Amino acid sequence: MNEQRLVEVLPAAQMGEAWALRVVFDELAPRVQGYLRTRGAAEPEDLTSEVFLAVFPRLSTVTGGAAGLRTLVFSVAHARLVDDLRRQGRRGPAVPYDPQRDDRVSPSSEDEAFDQLAVERVRTLLGTLPADQRDVLLLRIISDLTVEQVAVAMGRSPGAVKQLQRRGLVTLRSQAREGRVPL
Amino acid sequence: MNHSGDDRDDMDTDGQQQELDDWTVDRLLAGQLADPGDLRQIVELVRLASALPPPAPNAALAEILRNGLPGEPVPERQTPRVGWPMRTGLIAAALFAATFGAATANALPAPIQAIVDDIKARNPFELPSPTQRQQDVPATRSPSPPQVPEPAAVPAPATQPQEERTVLPPLSDRSGEAPVTRSADDTAVTEGRDERDEAEDDREAGTDPEGPPQPEEPDEPDEPDESEDVEGAVEVDQEDPTELTSDPED
């Protein structure tokens, strides 16, 4: 993620310029998709597009430069993810993910297969954590948000975010030492 | 605090939580910690999983990325909408301003003018009267009656003894000077100024310094509610407006 580039194009993006919106999308969409995918969104690509469709009309309200833009984008992404997970919950229990049966991944592309394997490893690794601890860790790592920005995105207090990330890391560390999670 | 994690086998959960202080967690999640142990591998794995190529946008988003955001929607009302509280406030302000102007010019009907004069008498600030405006006299008055020839030991008059009044210098002396605020306790300045006022008044009028003040003009009939002290101050203002200045050096 190129912070300087985001800062440079943000004014033009706020004016609705297509080229600037493309830069914002190219810089932030991979991380948004990674966050949604590792958290188990049903259709990460479509959900990513929905996130940016909701973000672009609100760009004029962004203050704080690139950090403010990231906070807005991942706030929307988190809200859309919660809605998506709720919808999946109403549909019934999710089927365990099997990458071999996922037709969205091109079997001829080694890179995509590798990425998908990495996503699967992360999902397995973080699967043992409560949902709020997973959200905090993913938002901190993937989106490079600060504690305060994660608190805004999740609607929690900064103190709660600190406690959640600490508990999540302690749990992950203990499980890694015991060999219960693959590294 | 051990940041290296060498004694990890001896640490229980509480010890691990204490080890993961805010500084450690921030560096760890940012990938800046040198030897954090297994957690660094986990963080790197998460970063790797999110290092994906940009996804393909759906049709609606692709349209925006191709042509930009559509223009601002045309508002239904072109004129700015003013709510009824704002409208009422504007009307009230206009009425107040009109009434104030008419009261200053003594153009109100007699009963209303009497009420306004009563309010003016209770107001600590001096409102300009038409005669003062005609003579271009600053609309201020002295804090104490300058024409009463009483000894210095006599206390200040009972009317508004503790109030502070802002006395502005004349227009010729206002450049760069802040208004001087006086209270009734400023007996030294007030007394000194009173004595000079008396001396100058006597010199100009040619009267006995010990005698009572002789007004040059009759009292204005349109200010019946003014007290004698206030009337005396107004007369002095009309004679020599510079005497209202706060600078005792003049």
Image (cartoon, rainbow, N blue to C red):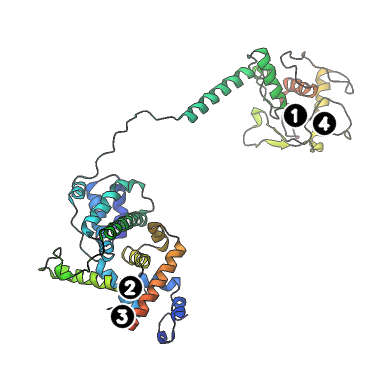
Q: Circle 1 is placed at which residue position?
A: B142
Instruction: Name the one closer to the observer, B14 or B40.
Output: B14
Give x and y (percent) for residue B174: 64, 32
Residue marked by disc 3: A180
- Say which residue appears at 28% left-offset and 69% top-offset: B47
The CA distance from mark 3 to mark 4 is: 91 Å
Q: Chain of mark 1?
A: B
The residue singled out by tag 4 in the image is B158
Task: Tell me if A87 is positioned left or right of A68 in this view.
Answer: left
Can residue B35 be seen in the rendering of this structure?
no
Q: Amino acid at mark 2?
A: Thr
Q: Are marks 2 and 1 on the same chain?
A: no
State how far apart marks 1 and 3 are (Cα): 90 Å
Q: Is residue B164 left or right of residue A25?
A: right
Answer above or below: position of A115 versus B123. below
Location of residue A149 with respect to A98 vertically, above or below: above
**Whether labels 1 and 3 share one chain:** no
State the separation of the CA atoms marked 4 and 1.
15 Å
Q: Secondary structure at mark 1?
A: loop
Q: Which label was assigned to residue A128?
A: 2
Sequence-wise, which precedes: disc 3 or disc 2?
A: 2
Whether pointer 3 and pointer 2 mark residues with C-beta atoms closer than 8 Å, the reply is yes
Q: Is residue B246 placed above or below B6 in the rendered structure?
A: above
Chain ID for label 3?
A
Can you tell which of label 4 and label 1 is closer to the viewer? 4
Q: Would you call the spot at circle 4 few (<14 residues within 10 Å), some (14-19), or many (20 or more)?
A: few
State yes or no: discs 1 and 3 in contact (Cβ < 8 Å): no
* Residue A56 location (% of width, % of height): 28, 48
